[in-house]
Amino acid sequence: MRVLLIEDDEAAAQYLTKGLAESGHVVDHAPDGPRGLVLATGEPYDVLVVDRMLPGLDGLSVIEALRKNGIVVPVLVLSAKGAVEDRVAGLRAGGDDYLVKPFAFAELLARLDALVRRSRPQAVETTLRLADLEMDLLARTVTRGGREVELKPREFRILEYLLRHAGQVVTRTMLLENVWDYSFDPQTNVVDVHMSRLRQKIDAGAAKPLLQTVRGAGYRLREEA
């Protein structure tokens, strides 16, 4: 990750820069608030480490200026002030985390990793697969061995739920609650009827069936060895 360190203490800056570089990160250093603000607004960084007490412009003012300019890069505030009101002030100014000096470098590194991890968008799952069965959640299509399987909306929801719980036994109650949105058992065979139709569609013509009935328990989508 690329880190901007805004720290006026030369010894602390050298220590942090060396440690971060040895951990495989790229570090830029600004020794005061104004220069730190210029770098932070002009360059892309994964995370900022900002000392609270800085010459020219204090750390909280730097953070507030960044937030007013729409810059949402994660910020870890460093400070010798560890009272509750000090930590609250740091977070309210726009900081994402607050670390009190003195600190262990391992903790600082772990906090930076966590900040960057939370700031990065998670990959959205768009395809579910089991053996040669594939479901495209965006196109709303299902194929088995390259053959398109035509499913009705309710059948699609059932199969999606089974794929998300592949290998697990899914009970009638689980299906009623998560596919039909029932909080009670209507005492009908609606689940069994839909499962029978779904089995015919996805296992028809296939060498190995995937949809299994587990007697006395429910259903399971699993590839047999």
Image (cartoon, helix red, strand yellow):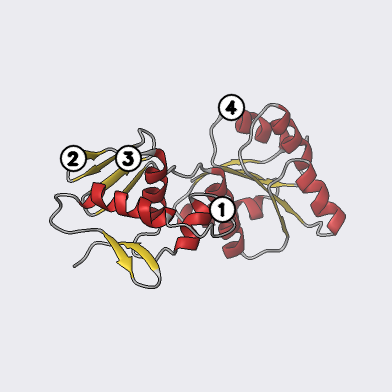
Q: Would residue 135 appear left or right of 22 to someone viewing this image?
A: left
Q: Would residue 117 appear left or right of 87 to someone viewing this image?
A: left
- 112 or 20: nearer the viewer: 112
- Residue under circle 1? 182
Residue 13, placed above or below residue 34: below
- Residue under circle 3? 151
Residue 62 x, y percent position in the rendering:
73, 36
Density class for disc 3 (Cα within 10 Å; few <14, some 14-19, many ≥20) is some
Label 4, label 1: how far apart the Cα atoms are: 54 Å
The residue sitting at the front extreme is: 188
Q: Secondary structure at mark 4?
A: helix
- Residue under circle 4? 42
Q: Secondary structure at mark 1?
A: loop
For badge 2, the amino acid type reads: Arg
Label 2, label 1: how far apart the Cα atoms are: 33 Å
- 209 or 72: nearer the viewer: 209
Residue 168 seen by the camera: no
For badge 4, the amino acid type reads: Gly
Foreground label between 4 and 1:
1
Q: Residue at x 35, y 60 (%)?
A: 166
Q: Secondary structure at mark 2?
A: strand
